[in-house]
Image (cartoon, rainbow, N blue to C red):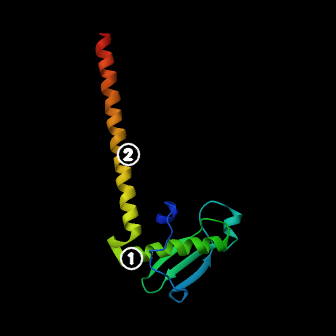
Amino acid sequence: RMPLLQATGKKNSDLLGLTEAELTEQFVRGDGPGGQATNKTNNCVVLKHIPSGIVVKCHQTRSVEQNRKIAREILQEKVDLFYKGEDSDVFKEKKASEKKKQEKKRRAKENLERKKHFKEMQQLDKK
């Protein structure tokens, strides 16, 4: 799962900063598909933000370094959302994307209705 703002290509400049002192980091075995590659390596990163108690688990790549970086980005967005609530950029971005999705669904439904109506009219013309 990609972080919300990262998925839209925005930089995390307006988000609350994290200090390493507030974080605890563990490397554990990941879960999911991958067989021996997953079962023998501790490349899944578990990152906890101590003040808020938010925990993020990242096992998106086989690289520990990349997982550490991604985990911090995800955690930063979650912490920002936790403290700022509806004022958070992450929240606004999520709302905007939901709105877009609903609009797309509505348009698709209208088109379907239009096609259905058109087919019915063609059937009537044939009779």
Residue 73 in the image, given as x and y percentages of width and height = 53, 72
SS assignment at label 1: helix
Taking depth in this image into account, of 122 and 24 the one nearest to the observer is 122
The crowding category of the residue bearing disc 2, from other C-alpha atoms within 10 Å (few below 14, some 14 to 19, many at least 20), is few
Please report the residue visible at 41 percent of the width from the left and 68 percent of the height from the top.
Answer: 90
**Location of residue 61 by image quarter:** bottom right
Instruction: Write the residue at 59% across / 62% down.
Output: 32
User: Residue 35 vs residue 86: left or right?
Assistant: right
Residue 83: quarter of image: bottom left
Name the residue furthest bottom.
Answer: 21
Q: Which disc, if any, is residue 19?
A: none
Residue 117, percent across and down?
Answer: 30, 26
Of the numbered discs 1 and 2, the one sitting upstream in the chain is: 1
Where residue 105 appears, as percent x and y from the top left, is: 36, 45
* SS state under label 2: helix
Comparing 89 with 27, the one in front is: 89
Q: Is residue 39 above or below residue 123?
A: below
Snapshot quadrant of residue 67: bottom right
**Closest to the observer, 95 or 65:** 95
Residue 118 versus residue 36: which sits nearer the camera? 118
Which residue carries the number 2 mark? Answer: 104
The residue located at (62%, 76%) in the rendering is: 28
Q: In the image, is residue 67 above or below residue 34? A: below
Would residue 113 be seen by someone viewing this image from the given angle? Answer: yes
Q: CA distance from mark 1 to mark 2?
A: 29 Å
Question: Quick one: label 1, few (<14), some, or many (20+) residues within 10 Å?
Answer: some
- Mark carried by residue 82: 1
Q: Is residue 85 left or right of residue 9?
A: left
Count the numbered circles shown: 2
Residue 97: x percent and y percent?
A: 40, 56
Amino acid at pointer 1: Phe
Q: Amino acid type of disc 2? A: Lys
